[in-house]
Amino acid sequence: MFQLTIRDATDEIDLLSLDYELVDGGFNVGKPESRDVWGGESVYVDGSALILSALGNRQSSIEFAVTGETRDILNHNVARLDRIIQRAKRKSIEEQGGPVELVYAWTDTVTSTHFEVLSGEIEWPEDVMGVEQVLQESEGRFRIKGFILSLTLSPLAYPVSLIYGDAENVQLSNGNGTGTSVTVNNANDTTKDNFVTISATQVQGAYPAFVTIKIKATTNDSEKTSKVYMGVRKGSMSFKSVLDDADSSFRIGSVGTTPSEACSGGTYSALTYAQTNPGTNPPIQEAVIIRWSLTDSEMESTRGPFRMFGRVRPTTYWDTNCNYAIRVSWNSVILSQTEWRSPLNTTTTLFDFGTVFLPPWLGTMQDLAGLDIEIVALRKSYGTTTIGLDYVALLPQDGGYRVLEFRGSGIAINEFLVDDGWKNSVYHENTSGKRAGVPFALMPPIRLIPHQDQRIYFLMEGTAGSSEITRDISVQVGVVPTFMVMS
Amino acid sequence: MQLTVTIWNSPAELPANFVEATTKFTGLSFSTQAQGGFTDASFAVKASGWNAVKWYREYLGFHVVIFDHLGRRVYEGSIEDAEADSEGVTITCLGYHAAVDELLHGVIYPIGTPATPTNLIEDVVDIASAYSVWSPDKSMVSKLTHDISPQDFSGEKKLADAIAEATKFGDNGLNPRPVYLAVWDHRRAYLYVEPSLVGKPTWLVYMKDFASAQGLGLSRSRSTVWNRIQVVYDDPLIGTTFTDFAEDKDSQRKFRIREGTVNIGQSLEGVAEVVRDLAIKAYASPEQTSSIEISNRVYSYAGAPDYPYMIRAGSLIKIMDYDPSVAQQVAGTSGQDTSVALISRTTYNAESNTISIELGRKSMSLDLFMAKLGTGSGSIS
């Protein structure tokens, strides 16, 4: 059976009912405007390049008649429509209350198509007070013809109700198992995985899907988990996701690795960088403190932007008397270097070096040669810096990047941190299911590309900045596919 | 690509200070300057009701950071103005360098106590950080060791006065290069010497990436050329004295002879001759002003494409396919066509993804040398 309904949590208006009669051919949904930004319109070359592309809202018009057993009921039915449109506008303007949706379905189909109604207007027939309109009565109902409802809708269609539906949890997998909820570790080595894989078949639709990520603390950590970094990989999954200290090709002072169960891969490296003043105050010299040499094949698969985080062993911190950078080089030729950064506090375990593009040239090049990745240190004053380096993580950013952080506190064991990209909210949920907007998010919500293998990587910090490798979470990923026309 | 404006009630950016993050703005633009760092930014928030009141009344003075989709910091400052009207609230921000005109310096560097530009700037950082305006981190303040004492910044003198004194001689080299003070990420002060044009450029651009036919703006005028120059000075023993002329024959062939005189006031013969020799280098070629507008990708030194908002003032940009025949003439002489230039100012417009870049104009050596002598500005006529 065909369905054409406008509804919210308060009311539902069926435009194919006795009260509202859709005119044959009276329902139209336009295409969303394509908002493209073109760059390089120079006269020095032919053509130009598409830089950005986004969709504008779409317009819909519905022509119908309103009926009622009495004229009062007819008037009431018109007012119902007016009220629901007003609620849609208020939701858009005030960002409060529930959404209004337009639901459309063909007969004999399983799914229905949902658009969010952002705004609208009812156009009355010109002769609404005319004798012909007022006296129209047939089959025991009064009837006014020629209403036109103009709606502004969301650009994309969803197969899920905005009011009653939820994102559907997809199958996840990693070394810890497979299912709609899997354990994610705060390290990536032979025994631990800090990612979930979502296979191509799990995400339907045509445009990037909305994603809801539900994170549950599963370990009773001394510091609650209060910050979660998430990066999405859509390129090769065999990329070099972690640079372990033991895998380095150079360590300052040729220092060996030190065994530690509290470190990823079972070791850390005590890197000592000293700058002494001989009495003549010479300029302080920077130094490479550790280097990893990526092979040709590792570089081939390690393409894209990566956020690099360096972890030091527990109870030690990055020295605030020193600046650090990540340098990429080829045969000692420096190709790129992040800006000098310094820890913002004295208890930084996981240090954010910033974003590094690998390889540091056009991404279309094939058959890549191996490159060196180095940590460079520059002391702020004469003295000695010692870092118990565990690893440098490459958090992929080619499919998205998001940081969730608590304004205070965090998630205790069995509590949730939810990044609901579908309902556009981020919240903490306690064991009783009660929600609080204590966390906030930076950078746009993660969207997953349909029909493509993807992974979401995680790194966590506790309330005081610790980042133990024993800190586990379980992750659920819900997805709402998006379509252009019918879902 | 998406930019997010985040608001914090304190520059410390602690989680407890977070106020809100929004992508619902229009008309976003922001600027950077070689002297200053992050400068101004503006955007409009289409808000009404309590949301508009919040932006208008509560956020004045709040800390603003603009991140890109990769979490890179592309602007940092604080809200300076809020204007509300029926369309919403328009927000204007200023970078933290603006504090140099707001805070008094108050330190005296007496005769007999050496004071270097670095000493002055480190004191500036201490003062600005004592009020929690700048970071106390001084590790990006370059070591400039020439003595510029005595200095007196007591009374109404502000931080800007100390910065002007600290930078007016450049790096004090034989062929001095300009020095700038910029406040960049996390309110950290950078005192840096203008990078040499023969060094590695930070950014590469191609003419295909220019915004339009007007994407490259160059102007040069013969009226700025002086290729036969003398200096007039007031000798303590002789009185008004003229040096011999210095000439640039190559310039005279190209632009015909243009004779000029530099008046440096009271001075000595040897100094006047040095000024003359610097002046002939500075004025032999037309002064060139350049600006480019890029609406496409820019490329890192190694060739990785990036968004144009990542370009900051104070770095070098190389136009890869601009007049390669003169691209070798980049050894620091003024006014020459070069394919590498210092970026003195950038303004990024988010709606069109276009960045306007003003390039450095000419060698500052003469101006810096004149400043060191305490003579006139080096103007010529």
Image: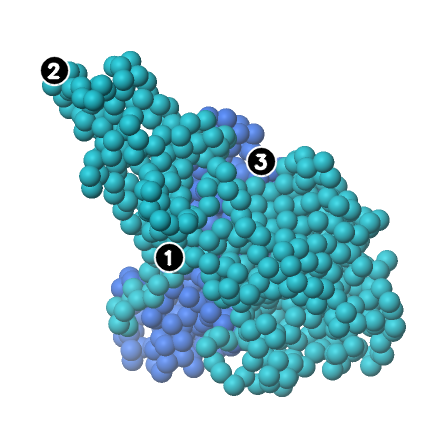
Chain colours: A cyan, B blue
Query: Where residue A3 appears, x then y in whole percent?
Result: 34, 40
**Disc 2 and disc 1: Cα gap in Å?**
51 Å
Share a chain, discs 3 and 2? no
Tag of residue B61: 3
Secondary structure state at the residue bearing disc 2: helix
Label 3 – label 2 distance at C-alpha: 63 Å
- State whether discs 1 and 3 lie on one chain: no
In terms of depth relative to the viewer, which is nearer, A421 or A109? A109
Discs 3/2, front: 2
Vertical side of A116 occupied by B54: above or below: above
Identify residue type, mark 3.
Gly
Q: Is residue A140 left or right of residue B353?
A: left
**Which residue in the structure is indicated by mark 1?**
A53
Q: How many marks?
A: 3
* Image depth: mark 1 or mark 3 in front: 1
| Residue A220 is at least partly visible in this image | yes
**Residue matched to label 2:** A131
* Left or right of residue A78: residue A394: right
Q: Chain of mark 2?
A: A
Q: Position of residue B40 (x, y in %)?
A: 49, 46
Q: Chain of mark 1?
A: A
**Which sits in the foreground, A328 or A211?**
A211
Q: Give the foreground label among 2 and 1.
A: 2
